[in-house]
Image: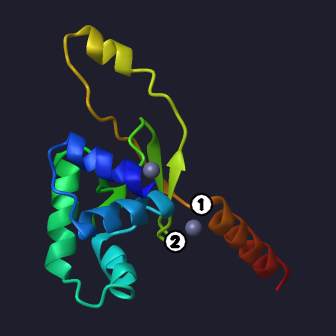
Amino acid sequence: MYEDDLTLLKAHHLKATPQRLQILHYLQTHHTHPGADEIYTALKRTTPSLSRTTVYNALETLKKEHLIHAITISGSETRYDSRLDTHHHFLCTHCKKISDIELICPNIKNVEGNGYCINEVHGYFKGLCPTCAKKQEQKHESQDVA
Ligand SMILES: [Zn+2]
Ligand SMILES: [Zn+2]
């Protein structure tokens, strides 16, 4: 994995700094769509000298080179994804978890048919995730009994 990331960075003419490699690796092994702060806190444990600015800058560079995707579903915080294929996201408004939604947008062909060249497609869904939806259902049921 590490070797692949090295090649990837080189292909994009980016210096393979340890920070960039660490961040890429973190995103590839944590599919929870973490935010910059979460990545910083996690990497700081093994690299105490790491600064918040370094993490922000590295994320910005990786994003610009399309090596990662930025997701702005929550409106307040940018979250990151190393998955680059077209997929959509679901934000649970209760537990704030972001999940991948496997859907193929049926409109892509229509848009491209009009001469547009699409690089990214983002579909944002919001509501309750299956776990939270179930919990709420149970809560309502127990309230009915009481
Ligand atoms: Zn939830
Ligand atoms: Zn995703």
State the residue position of label 1: 129
Q: Residue at x 53, y 44 (%)?
A: 101
Disc 2: residue Cβ within 8 A of ligand 1's nearest atom:
yes
Q: In terms of depth relative to the viewer, which is nearer, 13 or 32? A: 13
Instruction: Classify 60 as above or below 143.
Output: above
Q: In terms of depth relative to the viewer, which is nearer, 117 or 136? A: 117
On the question of residue 46 being in view, the answer is yes
Marks 2 and 1 close (CB-CB < 8 Å): yes
Task: Determine whether, in the image, residue 124 is placed left or right of residue 95.
Answer: left
Q: Position of residue 145 (x, y in %)?
A: 85, 80
Residue type, mark 1 in image: Cys
Rounded to the nearest whole Å, what is the CA distance between mark 2 and mark 1? 8 Å
Q: Position of residue 62 (x, y in %)?
A: 22, 54
Disc 1: residue Cβ within 8 A of ligand 1's nearest atom:
yes
Secondary structure beneath dot 2 equals loop
Q: Residues within 10 Å of mark 2 (few under 14, many from 20)?
A: few
State the residue position of label 2: 94
